[in-house]
Image (tube, rainbow, N blue to C red):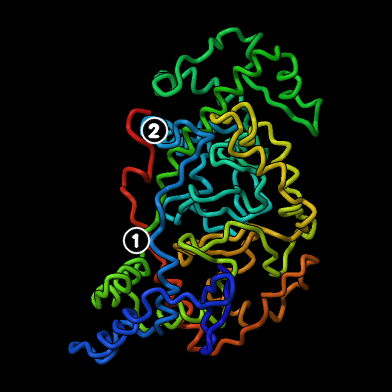
Amino acid sequence: MATGQGADGAAVRRRPGGAVVLLAATALAALVLVAATRPEDDAPALVLTPEEAELALEFSPLPPIPADPTNAVADDPDAARLGQAMFFDPRFSRDGDVSCSTCHQPDLSWTDGRPLARGVSETPRHAMTLWNVAWNRWFFWDGRKDSLWSQALAPFEDAREHATSRLAVVHAVADDAAYAAAYEAVFGPLPDLSDAERFPAEGRPVPDDPGHPHAAAWDAMTEEDRAAVDRVYSDLGKAIAAFERRIVSRRAPFDVFVEGVREGDPEKQAAMSPSAQRGFALFAGRGRCLLCHDGPTFSDLEFHSNRVPVTNMGDGGRAQGIQDVKADPFNAASAYADDGGASATVRLAIAPKNLHFPGEFKTPTLRNVVRTAPYMHEGQLATLDDVLAFYSTMETALPPDPTGERFLQPRHFDEQELADLRAFLEALTDEELPEALKGPPAGF
């Protein structure tokens, strides 16, 4: 459905033909009357208009975790346990001091609190949170990966992150009794890697530096042996993905509020303050934030120019990401996808690189956004108030890119409106996870 504006400036969904969809508008209007007469409080539990309340229903609940046909063990608890162990283990890095949790710390809402992520050295981008990562279609800020398991592989061989190689990672698993047993329980027997001439301690493809020692070791291997290593390596990515799919946020005060709207329950409606509700009305209405931050994940899962000033003007963003994902030997159309590439072949073939320009990056989720500072792909904006102020005035904004997108315009929010928007964003906070997921499992 398309998005338009009601007479009061609130955004409403419209079906083709222009008819405004007012699902259960009469019931919602009745809720306003009921809430307005609550005896225990002068302020109503529900202050949204019927149209605004109807629109809120589209943002919650979060749907079931989508299946990943490219990963046969995506929902296997034993695979998730193996992946969780690897996620928190710094042994899978060059110097033994960097793990996935270095940049994705549970206590920092699965980020690292830095403007630019740092592994072995500083990277050029901010670490994205892992909350609800299972719903993504593309991964990294530029979408250069098209599955969660393939994304999990990239940091191991990035010289700025783990700075190791696939051979080293596979050897580390095979040489550790607990890891080897966990792997074989999920994926079957490991190949025999004991012959050091056939399977060197280090090795990986290095397309931009064929003289690199890792590349020389890799190129000296037979094609069959390289394929065996790649198979184990891709399996390990699938195990890490199985763990990361469990990092889910779905029960924020906003979700309780929406339940209250749907059920006609004033107590649940009171989960969001009147200020937060006014903030949602601005978010969905005059602010037009929903044009990018749409749906229960609060992301359209696509790529846009956010127009925030940058340091690295040479960052290719989505335009480069499309080229990279198509060339990725572990993409979802590869031999390592468990559905034989059926789910991704067409999607990759039609990815329109000519419609994207440098400076376009993925829309991040807003769930738990108050806990994931700093913001934007370079961490350019230190606080949430900085973000709101920037989009209110856009005084320092970069010019629009050539795509023709013009919906980012200054909204000139006053102080109360900025406070209401912040209150709404705070109401998207739900960091509840079992403590057992916040560190390595026992036995590794």
Q: Residue furthest bottom?
A: 42
Q: Residue furthest left?
A: 39
Which structural element holds mark 2? loop
Q: Quadrant of the N terminus?
A: bottom right
How many numbered dots are placed on residues in this image? 2
Q: How far across and down, in percent of the image, does residue 401 sit?
A: 78, 67
Tag 2 residue: 76
Q: Is residue 420 above or below residue 240?
A: below
- 187 vs 349, nearest the viewer: 349
Which structural element holds mark 1? loop
Judge from the rendering whether residue 437 lies leftward or rightward of residue 195; answer left or right: left
Judge from the rendering whether residue 125 lies leftward or rightward of residue 72; answer left or right: right
- Determine which of the numbered discs, if any, sits on residue 251 in the image: 1
- Determine which of the numbered discs, if any, sits on residue 380 in the image: none
Amino acid of disc 2 = Asp
Label 1 vs 2, first from the N-terminus: 2
Q: How far across and down, in percent of the image, does residue 35 sit?
A: 27, 85
- Quadrant in the rendering for residue 244: top left
Neighbour class for label 2 at 10 Å: few (<14), some, many (≥20)?
Answer: few
